[in-house]
Amino acid sequence: MVQWHYLWGEATHRWKRTALTSAGIAMAVALVVLLDLLGRAFADVSTLPFRNLSTDLIVQRAATQSALPKQMGIMLPYSAQPITDEELMRLSAEEDVEQAAGFVLLWNFGSGRFFSISGIPHDDGTPTLGPGKARDWLIKGRLPARGARELLVERHYGAFYRLEPGSTVDLGGTMFEVAGVIDIKEGSQLVASNFYMDIDQARHLAALPPNTVNQVLLKVAQMERTEAVKTRIAGWLPRASVMSPDTMLGLFGGISSVVGRFRLATLLGGGLAALALVAVLIYGALQERRKDIALLRTLGWTRRQVHAQLIAETALQGIAGGLLGLILVAVGVSLLGTVSLSLPASLPGENPADFLTGSFRSAPESIRLPILVTNLHWLLPPAVAGAMCALLGGWISSRQTLGSLWASSKAV
């Protein structure tokens, strides 16, 4: 039977010890919760570009070498060499792949301007993935007619070079008319280009065979199968370069990459560190109570009564620490909510401006770190902290109350 009046008196009379233990528990709770929130936030940011493009994987084929171009004009990027129609069909039929769409990505190293072009299919049955969403981004003008020498221009690039619907652009010696202007939505810069045109026109510019593509976007039925599909594709497609949300985490670098890619391992490490801290605090607090324990035994308290009393005390400290930890979590969430991350305007090597200077270069997109706190993050910490402290307190106190009554009397 727990003596609640004694429990309250002990907590208030020795308030410094109680406050120290509860504060340490609060720090441990805040560490674990904030690590979990950070890991989820970084993982969410890494999926944002893919999510807004309605895709999970971007498949390309790398060249055997990568260097500055030896020739000027329209060319295939070194990171996006041709993928045949048979390979595209095999990618579409890959296990766990729900949708697939192929595109043509081109670079132009013409005099004075360096830009990128995306060739998008106009077939009604083609899934609207990646660059294919350009038709949804139209803000001015109209979509290019199929087979016509017309194109769409990205808003910022168009403003930089004063291109409007009706303007003409020389691409590789062929004149194209600007049919419309598009505004690429937030988080969709990953496969952004300066111009978008009919895929057959893009093939003609690069002298590619019919049905050839050099960029394939895949939608996986279950997101947790993404890395498995990526591994299988890399196993059979020669020189495959398969980008996934995990690739994005690698681009962030630093602690964001570690926490995001190894969230469970980081959380486990933080949890073990928090558990060790709590165990040390409880052990120290109970060590200071050795004479109190001996006194209670000599006053007639049974070993079970002392044990139950100490379990209740440590559980109370755990709950108090959990509640204090929530205050620290709230402060941490408000601070983390001000942190911004820069999403790359393109994947490494995807922009011709990466190779030459003097061209229009899209600025990296900045996004606030999405910290999502659920009800469980508010409800679980006090309960878990109380339960863990009770278990630790019970185990440690059982080691201290095993002595005989005579031994306890001698300790007083």
Image (tube, rainbow, N blue to C red):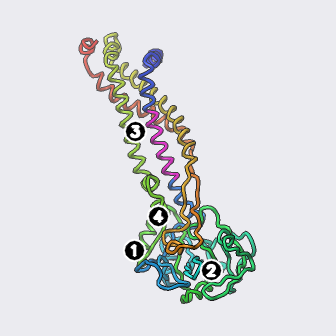
In the picture, measured across the screen, residue 219 lies left or right of residue 122, that is: left
Asked if residue 26 is among those painted magenta in the image, a careful observer would answer: yes
Q: Earlier in the sequence, mark 2 or mark 1?
A: 2
Front disc: 1 or 4: 4
Q: Circle 4 is placed at which residue position?
A: 247
- Cβ–Cβ under 8 Å for marks 3 and 4: no
Give the mark, 2 or 4, whose residue is nearer the N terminus.
Answer: 2
Image spot of residue 263 (x, y percent): 44, 52
Q: Quadrant of the N terminus?
A: top left
Between label 3 and label 4, give the one nearer the viewer.
4
Disc 2 secondary structure class: loop
Which residue is drawn at the image coordinates 47% and 15% (left, top)? 5
Task: Compare marks 3 and 4 and give the one earlier in the sequence.
Answer: 4
Disc 1 designates what residue? 235
Front one among 223 and 321: 321
Badge 4: residue crowd in 10 Å (few <14, some 14–19, many ≥20):
some
Q: Which of the two marks, 2 or 1, is nearer to us in this view?
A: 2
Is residue 409 at least partly visible in the picture?
Answer: yes
Magenta residue check for 36 = yes
Which residue: 33% across, 17% down? 293
Neighbourhood count class around disc 2 (C-alpha, 10 Å): few under 14, some 14–19, many 20 upward? many
